[in-house]
Image (cartoon, helix red, strand yellow):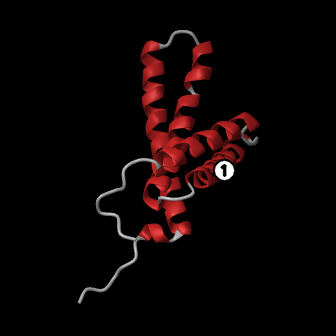
Amino acid sequence: MRRHRRSIWSSSRLSMLISTVSGIIFLFVTVLAVSGFAFFFVSDFRLLRIISLLPLFTGAFSAGFIFGKYRRHKGMISGIICGLILYAVLSAAGILLSGSPSHFSKLLLLVSAGAIGGITGVNSKRPKKLRD
């Protein structure tokens, strides 16, 4: 008789950590892609302010989406928490590197993108090999 093993997604703290780390990875990958695009194709520096928001959105959205897809409940709340954790990490990095924390507008962007990602993840198809 097989033993029932619990999934890593049954623990809320561990799954929050995994989804937030994956959101940070997506954020860095998007930063590299956007910086390469800006280096080669953008000549107007006013456009960079708008383009620089894209990595923040994709990082928070992916963290909320992964958490919502594998936890399968409370997508908006979990996405908001992922956005808050990402904001805390980015503010800590900003304090260490430049001496000032991130702006409040980044908090609003990260929280709303995380909430949208969490809602989208909960409403997406269930993963095939998900164990409860």
Q: Position of residue 73 (x, y in %)?
A: 52, 59
- Where 75 sits versus 28, above or below? below
Helix, strand or loop under label 1: helix
Query: Viewed as shown, does residue 103 lie left or right of 32?
Result: right
Graded by Cα atoms within 10 Å as few (under 14), some (14 to 19) or many (20 or more), the crowding at tag 1 reads many
**Residue depicted at 45% across the width and 52% down the height:** 66
Q: Position of residue 91 (x, y in %)?
A: 69, 46
Tell me, yes or no, if residue 21 can be seen here. no
**Residue depicted at 43% across the width and 59% down the height:** 70
Query: Viewed as shown, does residue 57 lie left or right of 92?
Result: left
Q: Position of residue 113 (x, y in %)?
A: 58, 39
Farthest residue, direction left: 1
Q: Nearer the viewer, residue 13 or 29?
A: 13
Query: Viewed as shown, does residue 88 lie left or right of 1?
Result: right
- Where 109 sits versus 20, above or below? above
**Residue depicted at 63% across the width and 51% down the height:** 89
Locate the N terminus by quadrant: bottom left
Q: Position of residue 121 (x, y in %)?
A: 46, 48
Residue type pointed to by label 1: Leu
**Residue depicted at 55% across the width and 53% down the height:** 75
The residue labelled by disc 1 is 84
Farthest residue, direction top: 43
- Where 11 sits versus 97, above or below? below
Locate the C terminus by quadrant: bottom left
Tell me, yes or no, if residue 102 can be seen here. yes
**Total numbered badges shown on the rendered structure:** 1
